[in-house]
Amino acid sequence: MNVFLNLSTNLLFFLGDHTEILSTLFIIFLAAKLSAEVFERLKQPAVVGEILAGVLIGPSLLVLVKPTDLTKTLAEVGVILLLFTVGLEIKPKALFQVGSRALLVAVLGVIIPFFAGWLLLTLWGEPTIEGIFLGAAMVATSVGITARVLASLNVLNTQTSQIIMAAAVIDDILGLLVLSMVSSMAKGSVNYKELALSASLSIGFTLFMVFVGAKIVNKTRPTVEKLKIGNAFFIVGLTLCLGLSFLASYVGVAAIIGSFLAGMALSEFSEDTDLHHKSGAVMEFLLPFFLVGIGMQLELAVFKDPRVIILALLATLIAVITKLIGCGIAALPLGRKQALQIGMGMVPRGEVGIIVAQIGLGLGVMSNTLYGVVVFMAVATTLIAPPFLIVLFKETRNELAKEEEEIVDSDKTLSVME
């Protein structure tokens, strides 16, 4: 009898927990897609609507859902798949052509925001280590957010977008190195040998995948075509995506860099296959958990103090201006329009800034107030950039559409002549 009661109790607990998980997934997904639809109809970026949905349904307002280990895991997988699908659109050769310019954009986009963030808190009267962490939070660009916007605008194949994506990848690597150094300083010392090893592995892994990985992958296509399993190209692509994400994380690079490089390595391999379509479908299911998760991280309660609001607004303004100036100056030889496009494309901090804040909070060197300021800055820059990118890329989109129409008209003319 006791055994039966124990089994019944465990079953009820499991079912209750299971129901809560499903309700959380349902609410997040539904809220994200409804918000995306509303914003699309308002001719605004869907990504903005999905992030604001997180603020609305999260702990700050309606408290319908809270971040859990499951939602965080789904968010991480979602952004990994996003960068994988973006990588599928970018050929390694195209990345080579913008390499030097992207490197300059990334370096200036790291140096200027870092020192500006540190200077802001120093002038504000906060401890030096908090200023350094704010600077670190301002360094890296959220590759996922920028990629999502550029993909939705259908401009990923332009030179400007390729510079943005390449610079964002370099930016992320540099940002992680800065974070490693800052974290070591917070603990009392900097392990330069460990830092040098991490830098070497990160750069070596990226260069190997760009220069060698794509060639190796392309040679495997005949073998993949002979596989008997269903959806062979999708399975091989997903395996490579997850494998390189793991390796990237293992050598000290963000997992999303590994997934981006996996997609890029498969860009030629996947031509005339359904890999793009199937990867995109899975990504569309998982990505809302990433975007809504960013919104849920924002705690509005810390902004009851007017000084915190002022500091948050100043941090956001500086975060935007320093990327525009740093990255824009590096891209100025391409023209003012492209410099603005690249500068604004590098503005979103998204999840990267929040991760830096979480580490600072965990180490006990960042207050809850400053944590709220950094999260506000990360979310605000993520919301600010997409509408400006739509405006800045409007002419480019029209030019691309015109070129496509001319190609279609030319094909029709040739068909009639034949």
Image (tube, grey):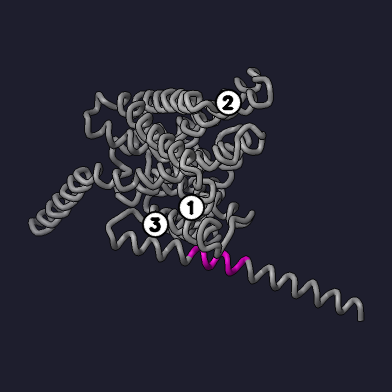
As for residue 25 lying within the magenta part, the answer is yes
Quick one: label 2, few (<14), some, or many (20+) residues within 10 Å? Answer: few
On screen, residue 377 versus residue 163, left or right, reads: right
Residue 250 on image: x %, y %: 63, 36
Q: Residue 114: which numbered mark, if any?
A: none
Say which residue appears at 56% left-offset and 40% top-offset.
Answer: 369
Q: Locate the N terminus by quadrant.
A: bottom right
Q: Which badge, 1 or 2, comes first in the chain's sequence?
A: 2
| Mark 2–mark 3 distance (CA, rounded to whole Å) | 36 Å
Quick one: label 3, few (<14), some, or many (20+) residues within 10 Å? Answer: many
| Mark 1–mark 2 distance (CA, rounded to whole Å) | 28 Å
State the residue lying farthest toward the left. Answer: 417
Q: Is residue 73 above or below residue 31?
A: above
As for residue 286 lying within the magenta part, the answer is no
Please name the residue that numbered disc 2 is placed on. Answer: 127
Residue 392 on image: x %, y %: 25, 42
Asked whether 50 or 277 is in front, the reply is 50
State the residue lying farthest toward the top. Answer: 192
The secondary element bearing badge 2 is classed as loop
**Quarter occupied by residue 74:** bottom right
Say which residue appears at 37% left-offset and 33% top-offset.
Answer: 95
Q: Is residue 225 visible?
A: no
Please give the range of residues in magenta.
Answer: 21-29
Q: Is residue 20 above or below residue 114?
A: below
Q: Which badge, 2 or 3, comes first in the chain's sequence?
A: 3
Please name the residue that numbered disc 3 is placed on. Answer: 49
Q: Main secondary structure of the magenta part?
A: helix
Q: Locate the C terminus by quadrant.
A: bottom left
Residue 232 on image: x %, y %: 51, 56
State the residue lying farthest toward the bottom. Answer: 1
